Structure formats: C-alpha cells, structure tokens
Amino acid sequence: MANNLRALREGRSWSQDEAATALGTTRNQYAKLEAGSRRLSDVWIGRAAAAFGVDAGDVVTDRRAVVPVVGHVGAGSEAHFGNSQGPIDEVAAPEGATPQTVAVEVRGESLGSFFDGWLVFYDDVRSPITDDLVGRLCVVGLEDGRVLVKRVQRCRNGHFDLYGQFGDPVLDVTIAWAAPVKSFAPR
C-alpha cells in the first residue's frame, strides 16, 4: 500500500530510527511500514499522523502535489498575505515539499529583476528566530506585520538587520518569525 511516510520523514530530516521512536516502534518495523511491505492499519496511520503533526489523510494521500500561495512580498517593505478565508492561489509543489510547505510570490525588484514574479517556498517557520538562521536567506515576518525575503544578520539587543541583493537594508528590527528559503521557482 502506498503511503507518504518517507516524504513526511524526509521533510523533517529524520532518520528511520528517529521516525520509529516517534511512532513508538522499532526501526525494522518502521522500515516495513514505510516501504509498504507491512499493512498501514488505522492504528499506524493515527500514530504517524500524531508523530508527524499532520492529518491522518496526509499519511496515506499525497496532498503535496500543490502548495498554497499565501501572499506576495514586494519591493522594499510591501507585503500582502491571504485573508482568513484561505490562500490566494495554489501552485505545483517543489521537490521535497512537506505538508507545511507554502509559497509567496515576489513582486518588484528587491531580489533583483530576475526574480520578479518568482515563487519562494518555505515550511520551517521558527518563532522566535533561531541562531542557525543568522546569515541565511529567509522569509521573515516582522512585528509590524511586514513580510520580507532577506538575509538575516544579528545587530544588537535581540534586533536584526535584513539585507537584500538590491535596495536599502532594513535595520534594527524585531523579527516575529523566520523561515529559511527552501527553494525558488519561476511562476
């Protein structure tokens, strides 16, 4: 029986041992479930859903064929995100997408004219920001509601400076959340 255990595990960068522990079983048993050589019963589906933090349907149905476009990021500091009724669009999922993967569309030239209209995919949202994101290109949510795609640098007192390829940096800001850019793709 086909299932999404491997995609879910790899989406979290887990080994089979780590996934087995999360499901409360052995690596050998988990490997058989993942390969489809052992039946994925309702009990195993429930355990996997809880371990991976997804709906039970995501364990057995590939819902990653598309990902939601949750908004767009503009030049400088403009941003627009979908309303409470849901995403503003859906697009083909990139390689390695997880159930948490979403996209934003770049509008303007803050990342250079080449990327105007491209999609930026991310899924590993961290709130608060973690040290491993410093120096990396991230989708960044600021306390004032702006959402940007910038390289993050620590400055002082828990604040950060944000740099793009073009335009002025955004200096001395508080980051509410950040996610490393997973990939870019033309629209």
Image (spheres, grey):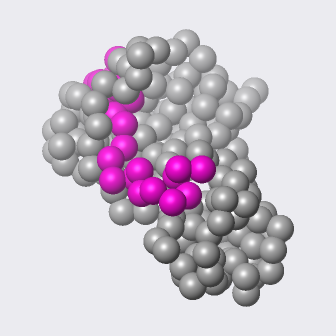
The picture places residue 154, in percent across and down from the top left corner, at: 64, 38
Q: Is residue 58 above or below residue 20?
A: above
Does residue 180 belong to the magenta stretch?
no
Q: Quick check: can you spot residue 13?
A: no
- As rendered, which of 159 and 119 lies closer to the eye? 119
Residue ID at (59%, 40%):
125
Q: Looking at the picture, how far across and down is residue 67, in whole percent?
A: 36, 43
Position of residue 47 relative to residue 123, above or below, is below
**118 in relation to 82, above or below:** below
Task: Tell me which segment is drawn in magenta.
Answer: 56-78
Q: Position of residue 85 (x, y in %)?
A: 41, 16
> Which image quadrant is residue 175 in?
top right
Residue 24 versus residue 127: which sits nearer the camera?
A: 24
Count every numbered label the image shows and give the total: 0
Q: Nearer the viewer, residue 90 or 122?
A: 90
* Residue at figure coordinates x 60%, y 17% from the top left: 143
Give x and y (percent) for residue 109: 22, 32
138 shown above or below 86: below
Res 74 visible: yes
Quarter of the picture holding the C terminus: top left
- On screen, residue 77 versus residue 143, left or right, reads left
Name the residue located 47 percent from the left edge and 37 percent from the top edge: 139
Q: Quadrant of residue 21?
A: bottom right
**Is 117 situated left or right of 32 in this image?**
left
Residue drawn at point x = 69 percent, y = 44 percent = 130
